[in-house]
């Protein structure tokens, strides 16, 4: 049964942070809020109050989420030792006073508190899951919270399938809400001359690109394997060049790997690149490669596709979803350096038999149809309908 047009909904959304650190989870949660805002403005849903409990941020930018029905409660201004207990107390007291119709846990870490409130007050809750956060869960309380959730919302079929296998969750209890991105930020353009000059490259030179955080705990991104594949690729394409965008604590180890293979002239570590410049880096390359094996989804694949670039990803994680099981790109064994080298050579030599790989406009159109913001809104609306939080 759906709500009538005069009724309204009160929702709480619990987030780790949104504004002071920009990562994939933060971007996804901001997209959820933006979609809720748009759906309300379009009168697809009626919102009385959306309370966002934020654990780590201390404030929000003035120009974001100004709607009167959005309210934010921050804990990041407190010393770190007090943030978790303060967040928990806020969640309990706010929920007790407000009795929301739905709690959305923006991270699995919050699920035990939502489970407690569900037991005390009967408030239904959703849990958003992304990737490694929901794999190999051993904590018994989190497992019970997963089982009791009204919905577990996964950004990818890969994570959903792992939860079914590892936690025994029924298929019907897990819904998909794939990520979205701002398609308009990414356009098909020629290789930027200023970047060619900056890195002493030629427009005709075959360039491979990866965009990833170089963190010690994110070596699963696969940039090591691309680096190791370069000597093999150079046998067929001597002037090949690899540009690796990203910063982090793993950079010294990556530099040592490059030096040990004698590839200093064939690899560029570009470091941090701003949002304003990142589209230029996608347009600099001839193929985007990130053969990862621990990615929850991988929005960078979508950004590269929106720039019309051929994309290669790993076949053991969320890249399977991002590339639509191979419809939008090529999936490889992320541990097989020979296969990575062979596929990249084939793509760069124009010999791939993939039907869409060299059709830049078709790649862009298809990724917008599947992962654009309108589709994201429609997917979220469908989930809300199932929870009796819409007007018709």
Image (cartoon, rainbow, N blue to C red):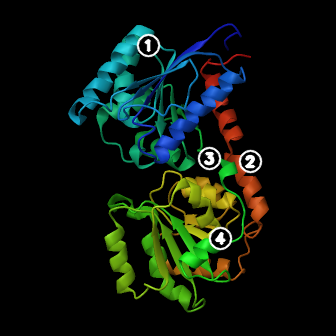
Q: Label 1: how many residues lie within 10 Å, few (<14), some (14-19) or many (20+)?
A: few
Q: Estimate the spatial distance between the alpha carbons at disc 1 and disc 4, rounded to whole Å.
A: 56 Å
* Mark 2 residue element: helix
Q: Estimate the spatial distance between the alpha carbons at disc 2 and disc 4, rounded to whole Å.
A: 27 Å
Question: Would residue 148 appear left or right of 330 to someone viewing this image?
Answer: left
Do residues under tags 2 and 1 come within 8 Å of each other at their CB atoms? no
* Mark 1 residue element: loop
* Mark 3 residue element: loop
- First in sequence: mark 2 vs mark 4: 4
- For disc 3, the marked residue is 181
Which x, y percent locates residue 3? 66, 12
Q: Estimate the spatial distance between the alpha carbons at disc 3 and disc 2, rounded to whole Å.
A: 12 Å
Q: Label 4: how many residues lie within 10 Å, few (<14), some (14-19) or many (20+)?
A: some
- For disc 2, the marked residue is 369
Residue 105 seen from this side: yes
Front-lying residue, 387 or 75: 75
- For disc 1, the marked residue is 122
Do residues under tags 2 and 4 come within 8 Å of each other at their CB atoms? no
> In the orientation shown, which residue stands out farthest toward the left?
81
Nearest to the eye among marks 1 and 4: give it. 4
- First in sequence: mark 1 vs mark 4: 1
- First in sequence: mark 3 vs mark 4: 3
Identity of the residue drawn at 68% across and 61% down: 307
Q: Estimate the spatial distance between the alpha carbons at disc 3 and disc 1, rounded to whole Å.
A: 34 Å
- First in sequence: mark 2 vs mark 1: 1
Numbered marks: total? 4
Which x, y percent locates residue 183? 68, 50
- For disc 4, the marked residue is 192
Which x, y percent locates residue 377? 67, 34
Nearest to the eye among marks 2 and 4: give it. 4
Does 112 sit above or below residue 252?
above
Residue 332 seen from this side: no
């Amino acid at each position: 049964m759906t709500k009538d047009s005069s009724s309204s909904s009160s929702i709480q959304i619990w987030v780790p942070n949104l504004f002071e650190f920009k990562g994939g989870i933060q971007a996804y949660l901001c997209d959820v809020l933006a979609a809720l805002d748009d759906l309300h403005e379009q009168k697809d849903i009626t919102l009385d109050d959306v309370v966002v409990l934020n654990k780590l941020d201390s404030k929000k930018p003035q120009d974001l989420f100004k709607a009167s029905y959005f309210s934010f409660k921050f804990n990041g201004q407190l010393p770190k030792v007090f943030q978790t207990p303060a967040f928990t107390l806020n969640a309990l007291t706010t929920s007790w006073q407000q009795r929301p119709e739905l709690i959305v846990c923006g991270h699995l870490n919050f699920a035990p508190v939502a489970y407690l409130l569900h037991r005390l007050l009967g408030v239904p809750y959703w849990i958003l899951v992304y990737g490694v956060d929901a794999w190999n869960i051993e904590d018994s309380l989190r497992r019970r919270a997963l089982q009791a959730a009204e919905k577990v919302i996964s950004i990818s079929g890969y994570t959903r399938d792992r939860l079914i296998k590892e936690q025994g969750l029924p298929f019907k209890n897990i819904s998909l809400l794939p990520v979205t991105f701002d398609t308009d930020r990414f356009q098909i353009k020629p290789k930027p001359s200023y970047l060619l000059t900056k890195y002493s490259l030629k427009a005709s030179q075959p360039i491979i690109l990866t965009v990833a955080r170089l963190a010690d705990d994110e070596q699963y991104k696969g940039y090591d394997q691309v680096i190791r594949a370069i000597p093999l690729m150079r046998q067929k394409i001597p002037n090949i060049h690899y540009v690796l965008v990203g910063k982090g604590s793993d950079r010294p180890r990556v530099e040592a790997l490059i030096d040990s293979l004698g590839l200093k002239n064939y690899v560029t570590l570009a470091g941090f690149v701003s949002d304003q410049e990142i589209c230029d880096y996608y347009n600099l390359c001839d193929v985007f490669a990130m053969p990862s094996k621990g990615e929850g989804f991988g929005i960078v694949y979508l950004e590269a596709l929106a720039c019309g670039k051929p994309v290669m990803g790993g076949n053991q994680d969320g890249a399977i979803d991002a590339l639509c099981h191979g419809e939008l790109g090529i999936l490889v064994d992320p541990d097989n350096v020979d296969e990575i080298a062979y596929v990249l050579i084939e793509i760069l030599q124009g010999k791939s038999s993939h039907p869409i790989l060299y059709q830049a406009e078709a790649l862009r159109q298809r990724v917008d149809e599947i992962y654009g913001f309108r589709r994201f809104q429609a997917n979220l609306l469908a989930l809300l309908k199932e929870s009796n939080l819409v007007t018709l």
